Amino acid sequence: MAERKLVNFKYRSGSAALRSLSDGTLYFARPDELNDSLEAKFVAADPASFQQRLAQTLTELAVQRGERVKYVAEEDVAEHYIRMIQEEDTAFATHCQKVGICSGTKRPDNQPLWAYYCNDSRGFCFEFEWPHNVVNEFNLLPTFVHYTAESRIHDRFEDMHAELVEVGKQNPSWSMEQIHEHFYSKDFLVKWLIRSMGRAVSNKHVDWAHEAELRMLSPIAGPLPILKSILKRVYFTRTDFPEWGPVQMLLHQLYPDVELAQVIFNHTEPLVRIQPMHKKLIPVTMSGTEQV
């Protein structure tokens, strides 16, 4: 079976595109660097619900395995236990603010995005294709943004439930004792943390829903030297801006295999058309000397 390709698109101003192509990097921003002031902002769920959620999940897995075991949460949760979870919630929220986010979207012909991320279409849209080796090497996590008008109460225990259910699916022969033991392993805790962070930093208000964002997350913010490995196509709509020429020169010199295409918008059918462009070297004669 052919490997399924993970693709997304990133709209760039002319200057941002030129800078990125020049140094071959893609920047992963901290949440507080993005244009939504509510990025990665949330309230933690009630810490007292942890034991109840864990007991429900373990009981669910026991039923699936045909084991006559029912897990029951303690009625009175010790105060020091609740404080420990609250401290974990604080540390979790702090780590979420350090995650690197590369915002992208699902298509290259979104007119509002051309307008305000590309300086009224005086910019470019990059098409990225993310090979598994790049994703794995840099510990990246693709995630769709969830848009909601509700209060953001992040329940890490929902992610605990989902990760334990996944463990059960991947290890159908494990007993409940083995699953319970695995729950306290470092491997499980890391996967739980990654899953929960990915969800926590990928919730936005419905006002942003038109962006249909598919973002890539990095454990830390900053530039990554991966552009040559993931850039497959560059789209444009206009050519009347200063960075147009230098960007074409960089694409020719440093990214010879990257394709070029023009997005054409119209008020009659077809409303959107994407025209592939072909590069061609043209001899230029200067002072009697032929140059390419």
Image (cartoon, rainbow, N blue to C red):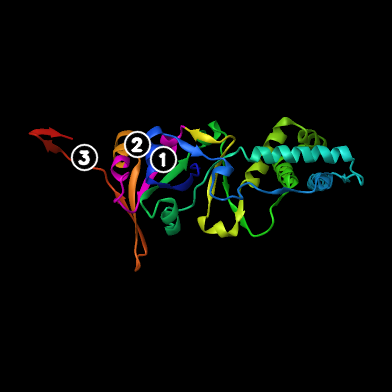
- Disc 1: which residue: 231
Q: Secondary structure at mark 3?
A: loop
Q: Residue furthest right?
A: 76
Look at the image and say whether residue 243 sits in the magenta stretch: yes
Residue 169 image-quadrant placement: top right
Which badge, 3 or 2, is on the more N-terminal residue? 2
Mark 2 surroundings within 10 Å by alpha-carbon count, few (fewer than 14), some (14 through 19), many (20 or more): some
The answer to whether residue 171 shows anywhere in this view is: no
Stretch of the chain drawn in magenta: 225-247
- The answer for how far apart the CA atoms under marks 3 and 2 are is 15 Å
Mark 3 surroundings within 10 Å by alpha-carbon count, few (fewer than 14), some (14 through 19), many (20 or more): few
- The answer for how far apart the CA atoms under marks 1 and 2 are is 8 Å
Mark 1 surroundings within 10 Å by alpha-carbon count, few (fewer than 14), some (14 through 19), many (20 or more): many
Give the amino acid at mark 3: Leu
Give the amino acid at mark 2: Tyr
- Disc 2: which residue: 255
Q: Are marks 1 and 2 in contact (CB under 8 Å)?
A: yes
Q: Secondary structure at mark 2?
A: loop
Give the amino acid at mark 1: Leu
